[in-house]
Amino acid sequence: MNKCLRMILSFVILLPLLTGCWDRQELNELGIMLGLGVDMEGELIKVSAQVVVPNEISNKSGGAKGTPVTQYQATAKTLFEAIQKLTEISPRQTFMSHIRVLVFGEEYARKQGIYDVTEALMREPSVRPDYYVLIARNTTATKVLDLLTPLDNIPAEKIFSSLDVSAKTWAPTTTVTGDKLMDSMISPGIQPVITGIEVIGNSENSGSKDNISFIRSPARLSSTGLGIFKGDKLIGWLTEEESKGYNYIRDNVVATVGHVDCPSSQGVVTLKTLRSKTKRKAKIVGGEPVIHIKVKTISSIASVDCGMSIGAMAAIRELEKQSQESLVELMQTSVNSVRRKYHVDIFGFGQEVYHANPKYFQKIEKDWDKYFENLEVKFESNVQIKRVGALDNSFKNEIKD
Protein backbone atom coordinates (compact mmCIF):
# COMPACT_ATOMS: atom_id res chain seq x y z
CA MET A 1 0.00 0.00 0.00
CA ASN A 2 2.79 2.41 0.92
CA LYS A 3 4.60 1.52 -2.32
CA CYS A 4 1.52 2.35 -4.43
CA LEU A 5 1.02 5.60 -2.57
CA ARG A 6 4.63 6.60 -3.22
CA MET A 7 4.25 5.85 -6.93
CA ILE A 8 1.07 7.91 -7.16
CA LEU A 9 2.71 10.85 -5.38
CA SER A 10 5.73 10.59 -7.69
CA PHE A 11 3.49 10.75 -10.77
CA VAL A 12 1.62 13.75 -9.34
CA ILE A 13 4.89 15.59 -8.79
CA LEU A 14 6.55 14.64 -12.08
CA LEU A 15 3.65 15.06 -14.52
CA PRO A 16 3.55 18.89 -14.33
CA LEU A 17 7.26 18.93 -15.19
CA LEU A 18 6.70 17.00 -18.45
CA THR A 19 4.45 19.57 -20.16
CA GLY A 20 7.16 21.90 -21.48
CA CYS A 21 6.29 21.46 -25.17
CA TRP A 22 2.55 21.92 -25.03
CA ASP A 23 2.71 25.41 -26.58
CA ARG A 24 5.64 24.87 -28.97
CA GLN A 25 5.78 26.81 -32.22
CA GLU A 26 7.80 25.53 -35.18
CA LEU A 27 9.95 28.09 -36.97
CA ASN A 28 8.78 26.97 -40.38
CA GLU A 29 5.22 27.83 -39.34
CA LEU A 30 5.95 31.38 -38.19
CA GLY A 31 6.25 34.69 -40.03
CA ILE A 32 8.76 36.75 -38.04
CA MET A 33 7.64 40.39 -37.91
CA LEU A 34 10.43 42.96 -37.53
CA GLY A 35 8.54 46.14 -38.39
CA LEU A 36 4.99 47.17 -37.50
CA GLY A 37 3.31 50.16 -39.14
CA VAL A 38 0.02 51.77 -38.08
CA ASP A 39 -2.00 54.09 -40.34
CA MET A 40 -5.57 55.34 -40.69
CA GLU A 41 -7.99 54.03 -43.28
CA GLY A 42 -11.26 55.81 -42.68
CA GLU A 43 -12.35 54.89 -39.16
CA LEU A 44 -10.26 51.70 -39.17
CA ILE A 45 -6.68 50.84 -38.28
CA LYS A 46 -4.46 49.81 -41.17
CA VAL A 47 -1.64 47.51 -40.07
CA SER A 48 1.50 46.97 -42.16
CA ALA A 49 3.66 44.04 -41.07
CA GLN A 50 7.21 43.75 -42.39
CA VAL A 51 7.99 40.02 -42.32
CA VAL A 52 11.30 38.28 -43.05
CA VAL A 53 11.55 35.97 -46.06
CA PRO A 54 13.81 33.19 -44.69
CA ASN A 55 14.96 31.81 -48.07
CA GLU A 56 16.22 35.23 -49.17
CA ILE A 57 18.42 35.90 -46.14
CA SER A 58 19.77 32.37 -45.74
CA ASN A 59 23.44 31.88 -46.64
CA LYS A 60 22.58 28.50 -48.11
CA SER A 61 20.10 29.85 -50.62
CA GLY A 62 22.76 30.30 -53.30
CA GLY A 63 22.30 34.05 -53.52
CA ALA A 64 19.13 36.02 -52.91
CA LYS A 65 16.92 36.56 -55.95
CA GLY A 66 13.94 38.28 -54.36
CA THR A 67 13.46 40.87 -51.64
CA PRO A 68 14.61 39.91 -48.12
CA VAL A 69 11.30 40.96 -46.58
CA THR A 70 7.67 41.12 -47.56
CA GLN A 71 4.88 43.32 -46.30
CA TYR A 72 1.37 42.22 -45.39
CA GLN A 73 -1.47 44.67 -44.76
CA ALA A 74 -4.88 44.40 -43.14
CA THR A 75 -7.51 46.75 -41.72
CA ALA A 76 -9.81 46.30 -38.75
CA LYS A 77 -11.36 48.15 -35.83
CA THR A 78 -8.54 47.26 -33.40
CA LEU A 79 -4.83 46.51 -33.66
CA PHE A 80 -4.89 42.80 -32.86
CA GLU A 81 -7.93 42.16 -35.01
CA ALA A 82 -5.97 43.57 -37.94
CA ILE A 83 -2.87 41.54 -37.02
CA GLN A 84 -4.90 38.35 -36.78
CA LYS A 85 -6.58 39.20 -40.06
CA LEU A 86 -3.16 39.02 -41.75
CA THR A 87 -3.58 35.23 -41.77
CA GLU A 88 -6.03 35.70 -44.66
CA ILE A 89 -3.09 36.57 -46.93
CA SER A 90 -0.03 35.27 -45.04
CA PRO A 91 0.79 31.54 -45.18
CA ARG A 92 2.30 31.75 -41.68
CA GLN A 93 1.16 32.92 -38.27
CA THR A 94 2.63 36.32 -37.39
CA PHE A 95 5.29 36.11 -34.65
CA MET A 96 5.71 39.43 -32.80
CA SER A 97 8.47 38.75 -30.27
CA HIS A 98 11.19 40.27 -32.50
CA ILE A 99 9.60 43.61 -33.42
CA ARG A 100 12.38 46.19 -33.85
CA VAL A 101 10.42 49.31 -34.85
CA LEU A 102 6.87 50.56 -34.42
CA VAL A 103 6.01 53.31 -36.93
CA PHE A 104 2.92 55.50 -36.68
CA GLY A 105 1.74 57.44 -39.72
CA GLU A 106 1.62 61.18 -39.03
CA GLU A 107 -2.10 61.40 -39.82
CA TYR A 108 -2.87 58.57 -37.40
CA ALA A 109 -0.75 60.15 -34.64
CA ARG A 110 -2.47 63.53 -35.09
CA LYS A 111 -6.10 62.42 -35.41
CA GLN A 112 -6.46 59.05 -33.73
CA GLY A 113 -3.82 59.21 -31.02
CA ILE A 114 -1.32 56.49 -30.18
CA TYR A 115 -2.63 55.31 -26.79
CA ASP A 116 -4.73 52.35 -27.97
CA VAL A 117 -1.89 50.77 -29.96
CA THR A 118 0.71 51.42 -27.26
CA GLU A 119 -1.52 49.92 -24.57
CA ALA A 120 -2.31 46.85 -26.69
CA LEU A 121 1.35 46.09 -27.38
CA MET A 122 2.35 46.61 -23.75
CA ARG A 123 -0.41 44.26 -22.64
CA GLU A 124 0.60 41.49 -25.08
CA PRO A 125 3.08 39.18 -23.23
CA SER A 126 4.80 37.99 -26.42
CA VAL A 127 5.92 41.52 -27.39
CA ARG A 128 9.10 42.85 -25.78
CA PRO A 129 8.91 46.62 -25.08
CA ASP A 130 12.44 47.39 -26.34
CA TYR A 131 11.34 48.29 -29.89
CA TYR A 132 11.89 51.86 -31.10
CA VAL A 133 8.84 54.05 -31.75
CA LEU A 134 8.87 56.54 -34.65
CA ILE A 135 6.49 58.87 -36.49
CA ALA A 136 6.39 58.74 -40.31
CA ARG A 137 6.68 62.45 -41.06
CA ASN A 138 4.69 63.76 -44.04
CA THR A 139 4.00 60.19 -45.13
CA THR A 140 2.53 56.88 -44.00
CA ALA A 141 4.03 54.06 -41.98
CA THR A 142 3.38 51.75 -44.94
CA LYS A 143 5.68 53.76 -47.21
CA VAL A 144 8.43 53.87 -44.57
CA LEU A 145 8.39 50.10 -44.10
CA ASP A 146 8.10 49.52 -47.85
CA LEU A 147 11.48 51.07 -48.63
CA LEU A 148 14.48 48.80 -49.27
CA THR A 149 17.78 50.16 -48.00
CA PRO A 150 21.49 49.47 -48.71
CA LEU A 151 23.97 48.08 -46.13
CA ASP A 152 21.19 46.53 -44.04
CA ASN A 153 19.01 44.52 -46.38
CA ILE A 154 16.18 44.35 -43.83
CA PRO A 155 14.59 47.84 -43.60
CA ALA A 156 13.39 47.48 -39.98
CA GLU A 157 16.91 46.56 -38.88
CA LYS A 158 18.29 49.50 -40.82
CA ILE A 159 15.88 51.91 -39.14
CA PHE A 160 16.67 50.50 -35.68
CA SER A 161 20.46 50.54 -36.17
CA SER A 162 20.54 53.95 -37.84
CA LEU A 163 18.51 55.59 -35.09
CA ASP A 164 20.56 53.84 -32.41
CA VAL A 165 23.86 55.11 -33.86
CA SER A 166 22.51 58.61 -34.55
CA ALA A 167 21.19 59.01 -30.99
CA LYS A 168 24.66 58.20 -29.64
CA THR A 169 26.62 60.48 -31.97
CA TRP A 170 24.31 63.31 -33.10
CA ALA A 171 22.45 65.57 -30.65
CA PRO A 172 19.17 66.28 -32.58
CA THR A 173 17.99 62.64 -32.49
CA THR A 174 16.97 60.36 -29.65
CA THR A 175 15.49 56.91 -29.15
CA VAL A 176 12.12 56.15 -27.56
CA THR A 177 11.26 52.56 -26.66
CA GLY A 178 7.77 51.22 -26.03
CA ASP A 179 8.11 51.18 -22.24
CA LYS A 180 9.70 54.64 -22.19
CA LEU A 181 6.83 56.00 -24.28
CA MET A 182 4.23 54.53 -21.96
CA ASP A 183 6.02 56.00 -18.95
CA SER A 184 6.04 59.52 -20.44
CA MET A 185 2.34 59.20 -21.35
CA ILE A 186 1.20 58.34 -17.81
CA SER A 187 3.74 60.21 -15.67
CA PRO A 188 2.72 63.62 -14.32
CA GLY A 189 4.67 66.69 -15.34
CA ILE A 190 5.91 65.56 -18.77
CA GLN A 191 4.54 65.04 -22.30
CA PRO A 192 5.86 62.47 -24.84
CA VAL A 193 8.37 63.21 -27.59
CA ILE A 194 9.03 60.80 -30.49
CA THR A 195 11.62 60.96 -33.29
CA GLY A 196 10.32 61.43 -36.82
CA ILE A 197 11.40 59.47 -39.89
CA GLU A 198 10.99 60.76 -43.42
CA VAL A 199 11.27 59.35 -46.94
CA ILE A 200 13.65 61.53 -48.97
CA GLY A 201 13.86 61.42 -52.75
CA ASN A 202 11.85 59.48 -55.32
CA SER A 203 9.87 56.77 -53.54
CA GLU A 204 8.07 55.51 -56.66
CA ASN A 205 10.06 52.23 -56.84
CA SER A 206 11.36 52.23 -53.27
CA GLY A 207 9.88 48.80 -52.56
CA SER A 208 11.80 47.08 -55.35
CA LYS A 209 15.45 46.12 -55.62
CA ASP A 210 15.94 49.01 -58.06
CA ASN A 211 16.21 51.29 -55.02
CA ILE A 212 19.45 49.60 -53.90
CA SER A 213 20.97 49.01 -57.33
CA PHE A 214 22.48 52.52 -57.46
CA ILE A 215 25.44 53.99 -55.58
CA ARG A 216 23.08 56.70 -54.34
CA SER A 217 19.63 55.27 -53.69
CA PRO A 218 16.78 57.27 -55.31
CA ALA A 219 14.79 57.04 -52.04
CA ARG A 220 16.28 57.11 -48.56
CA LEU A 221 15.10 57.13 -44.96
CA SER A 222 16.17 59.94 -42.66
CA SER A 223 15.53 60.61 -38.97
CA THR A 224 14.21 64.14 -38.91
CA GLY A 225 13.09 66.25 -35.95
CA LEU A 226 11.26 65.35 -32.77
CA GLY A 227 7.47 65.13 -32.67
CA ILE A 228 5.71 66.83 -29.74
CA PHE A 229 2.65 65.20 -28.18
CA LYS A 230 -0.10 66.44 -25.94
CA GLY A 231 -1.52 63.40 -24.24
CA ASP A 232 -1.37 60.79 -26.98
CA LYS A 233 -1.81 63.05 -30.02
CA LEU A 234 0.89 64.65 -32.16
CA ILE A 235 0.65 68.46 -32.17
CA GLY A 236 3.88 69.62 -33.85
CA TRP A 237 7.57 69.24 -34.58
CA LEU A 238 10.80 70.64 -33.17
CA THR A 239 13.45 72.00 -35.55
CA GLU A 240 16.95 70.54 -35.55
CA GLU A 241 18.29 73.25 -33.22
CA GLU A 242 15.29 72.95 -30.89
CA SER A 243 15.76 69.17 -30.83
CA LYS A 244 19.39 69.68 -29.78
CA GLY A 245 18.34 71.93 -26.92
CA TYR A 246 15.69 69.44 -25.82
CA ASN A 247 18.16 66.55 -25.76
CA TYR A 248 20.71 68.53 -23.76
CA ILE A 249 18.05 69.42 -21.18
CA ARG A 250 16.82 65.81 -20.99
CA ASP A 251 20.39 64.44 -20.68
CA ASN A 252 19.99 62.46 -23.90
CA VAL A 253 23.23 63.65 -25.52
CA VAL A 254 26.01 61.07 -25.49
CA ALA A 255 28.34 62.59 -28.10
CA THR A 256 27.91 65.08 -30.93
CA VAL A 257 29.66 67.70 -33.08
CA GLY A 258 29.06 71.46 -33.25
CA HIS A 259 30.87 74.70 -33.99
CA VAL A 260 31.52 78.19 -32.61
CA ASP A 261 32.72 81.33 -34.38
CA CYS A 262 36.39 82.20 -34.20
CA PRO A 263 36.77 84.98 -31.60
CA SER A 264 39.06 87.32 -33.55
CA SER A 265 38.67 86.38 -37.22
CA GLN A 266 36.22 84.99 -39.73
CA GLY A 267 35.64 81.27 -39.75
CA VAL A 268 34.59 78.63 -37.25
CA VAL A 269 36.10 76.12 -34.87
CA THR A 270 34.46 72.69 -34.86
CA LEU A 271 34.15 71.01 -31.48
CA LYS A 272 33.51 67.34 -30.88
CA THR A 273 31.58 66.62 -27.68
CA LEU A 274 33.04 63.49 -26.12
CA ARG A 275 30.87 63.33 -22.99
CA SER A 276 27.88 65.25 -21.71
CA LYS A 277 26.01 65.21 -18.42
CA THR A 278 22.95 67.23 -17.41
CA LYS A 279 21.66 67.74 -13.89
CA ARG A 280 18.14 69.08 -13.27
CA LYS A 281 16.85 70.34 -9.97
CA ALA A 282 13.70 72.15 -8.83
CA LYS A 283 13.26 74.47 -5.86
CA ILE A 284 10.25 76.27 -4.46
CA VAL A 285 11.22 79.92 -3.95
CA GLY A 286 8.64 82.31 -2.52
CA GLY A 287 5.88 79.84 -3.30
CA GLU A 288 6.90 79.54 -6.97
CA PRO A 289 8.86 76.72 -8.64
CA VAL A 290 12.30 77.44 -10.08
CA ILE A 291 14.18 74.97 -12.31
CA HIS A 292 17.98 74.77 -12.38
CA ILE A 293 19.63 73.12 -15.40
CA LYS A 294 23.39 72.47 -15.34
CA VAL A 295 25.16 70.89 -18.31
CA LYS A 296 28.78 69.75 -18.24
CA THR A 297 30.54 68.64 -21.42
CA ILE A 298 34.02 67.38 -22.26
CA SER A 299 35.06 68.34 -25.78
CA SER A 300 37.94 68.24 -28.22
CA ILE A 301 38.81 70.45 -31.20
CA ALA A 302 37.96 68.71 -34.45
CA SER A 303 38.94 71.42 -36.95
CA VAL A 304 40.00 75.08 -37.11
CA ASP A 305 38.71 77.04 -40.11
CA CYS A 306 40.54 80.27 -39.35
CA GLY A 307 44.00 81.55 -38.41
CA MET A 308 43.34 81.28 -34.69
CA SER A 309 46.23 80.20 -32.48
CA ILE A 310 44.82 77.40 -30.34
CA GLY A 311 48.14 76.47 -28.80
CA ALA A 312 47.67 79.13 -26.12
CA MET A 313 45.52 78.46 -23.04
CA ALA A 314 43.92 81.89 -23.40
CA ALA A 315 42.51 80.86 -26.79
CA ILE A 316 41.17 77.61 -25.33
CA ARG A 317 39.48 79.50 -22.51
CA GLU A 318 37.89 81.89 -25.02
CA LEU A 319 36.51 78.94 -27.01
CA GLU A 320 35.15 77.36 -23.82
CA LYS A 321 33.41 80.62 -22.90
CA GLN A 322 31.81 80.93 -26.34
CA SER A 323 30.71 77.30 -26.26
CA GLN A 324 29.09 77.78 -22.86
CA GLU A 325 27.17 80.83 -24.03
CA SER A 326 26.08 79.03 -27.21
CA LEU A 327 24.87 75.98 -25.26
CA VAL A 328 22.81 78.10 -22.85
CA GLU A 329 21.27 79.99 -25.77
CA LEU A 330 20.44 76.68 -27.49
CA MET A 331 18.53 75.40 -24.46
CA GLN A 332 16.76 78.71 -23.85
CA THR A 333 15.62 78.86 -27.48
CA SER A 334 14.18 75.35 -27.27
CA VAL A 335 12.22 76.06 -24.08
CA ASN A 336 10.92 79.44 -25.29
CA SER A 337 9.87 77.99 -28.65
CA VAL A 338 7.88 75.15 -27.05
CA ARG A 339 6.21 77.60 -24.66
CA ARG A 340 5.25 79.96 -27.48
CA LYS A 341 4.05 77.41 -30.04
CA TYR A 342 2.83 74.34 -28.14
CA HIS A 343 2.29 75.24 -24.45
CA VAL A 344 3.17 71.76 -23.14
CA ASP A 345 5.97 70.61 -20.86
CA ILE A 346 8.03 68.09 -22.84
CA PHE A 347 11.15 68.71 -20.72
CA GLY A 348 9.91 67.06 -17.54
CA PHE A 349 10.15 70.23 -15.43
CA GLY A 350 6.91 69.19 -13.72
CA GLN A 351 8.54 65.90 -12.73
CA GLU A 352 11.38 67.78 -11.07
CA VAL A 353 8.89 69.91 -9.12
CA TYR A 354 7.06 66.76 -8.06
CA HIS A 355 10.29 65.16 -6.84
CA ALA A 356 11.23 68.32 -4.95
CA ASN A 357 7.84 68.84 -3.28
CA PRO A 358 5.11 66.24 -4.05
CA LYS A 359 2.41 67.99 -2.01
CA TYR A 360 3.02 71.31 -3.76
CA PHE A 361 2.89 69.72 -7.23
CA GLN A 362 -0.34 67.87 -6.47
CA LYS A 363 -1.99 71.22 -5.80
CA ILE A 364 -0.96 72.69 -9.16
CA GLU A 365 -0.84 69.53 -11.31
CA LYS A 366 -4.09 70.25 -13.18
CA ASP A 367 -2.85 73.74 -14.10
CA TRP A 368 0.78 72.77 -14.72
CA ASP A 369 0.74 73.86 -18.37
CA LYS A 370 -0.14 77.39 -17.21
CA TYR A 371 2.69 77.33 -14.67
CA PHE A 372 5.03 76.07 -17.41
CA GLU A 373 4.26 79.19 -19.48
CA ASN A 374 5.87 81.47 -16.89
CA LEU A 375 8.19 79.02 -15.17
CA GLU A 376 11.59 80.44 -14.21
CA VAL A 377 14.34 78.26 -15.67
CA LYS A 378 17.99 78.96 -14.88
CA PHE A 379 20.64 77.53 -17.19
CA GLU A 380 24.30 76.91 -16.49
CA SER A 381 26.88 75.23 -18.70
CA ASN A 382 30.45 74.10 -18.16
CA VAL A 383 32.41 73.24 -21.31
CA GLN A 384 35.91 71.84 -20.94
CA ILE A 385 38.15 71.41 -23.99
CA LYS A 386 40.58 68.64 -23.12
CA ARG A 387 42.16 67.92 -26.51
CA VAL A 388 43.21 69.90 -29.59
CA GLY A 389 43.76 66.93 -31.90
CA ALA A 390 47.02 65.98 -33.64
CA LEU A 391 47.85 69.62 -34.53
CA ASP A 392 48.32 72.74 -32.42
CA ASN A 393 47.76 75.78 -34.62
CA SER A 394 46.00 75.86 -37.98
CA PHE A 395 48.29 75.95 -41.04
CA LYS A 396 45.73 77.87 -43.11
CA ASN A 397 47.82 81.08 -43.12
CA GLU A 398 50.90 79.17 -44.25
CA ILE A 399 49.35 77.89 -47.50
CA LYS A 400 51.32 79.26 -50.48
CA ASP A 401 49.45 81.47 -52.96
Image (tube, grey):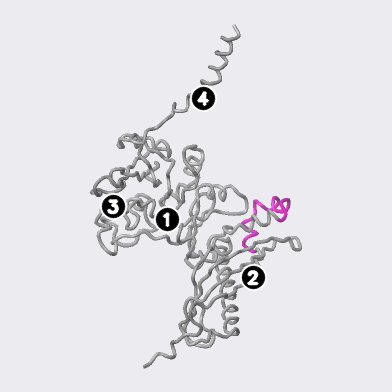
Q: Position of residue 209 (x, y in %)?
A: 25, 54
Looking at the picture, which amino acid does disc 2 mark?
Answer: Glu
Q: In which quarter of the view is residue 372 placed?
A: bottom right
Distance from disc 4 to disc 2, alpha carbons, whole Å, reads 60 Å
Q: How many marks?
A: 4
Marks 4 and 1 sit apart, C-alpha to C-alpha, by 40 Å
User: Between disc 3 and disc 1, whose residue precedes?
Assistant: 1
Mark 4 vs mark 1: give the one in front: 4
Q: Is 34 left or right of 177, judged from the image as shown?
A: left
Residue 71, position as x, y percentages in the image:
32, 45
Distance, label 2 to label 1, CA atoms, is 33 Å
Q: Secondary structure at mark 1?
A: helix
Report the amino acid beneath label 1: Ser
| Residue 380 badge | 2
Q: How much space separates mark 3 and mark 1, taking CA atoms?
A: 20 Å
* 391 to 32, vertically: above or below: below
Question: From what the image shows, is residue 208 above or below residue 246?
Answer: above
Percent across and percent down for residue 375 are: 65, 63
Prevailing secondary structure class for the magenta stretch in the rendered image: helix
For mark 1, what is the residue?
161
Q: Nearer the viewer, mark 2 or mark 1?
A: 1
**Which residue position holds label 4?**
17
- Alpha-carbon distance for marks 2 and 3? 48 Å
Is residue 284 in the magenta section?
no
Which residue corresponds to mark 3? 207
Q: Callout 1: 10 Å neighbours few (<14), some, many (20+)?
A: some
Q: Earlier in the sequence, mark 3 or mark 4?
A: 4
Q: Foreground: 384 or 172? A: 384
Amino acid at dot 3? Gly
Q: Please give the range of residues in magenta.
A: 356-374
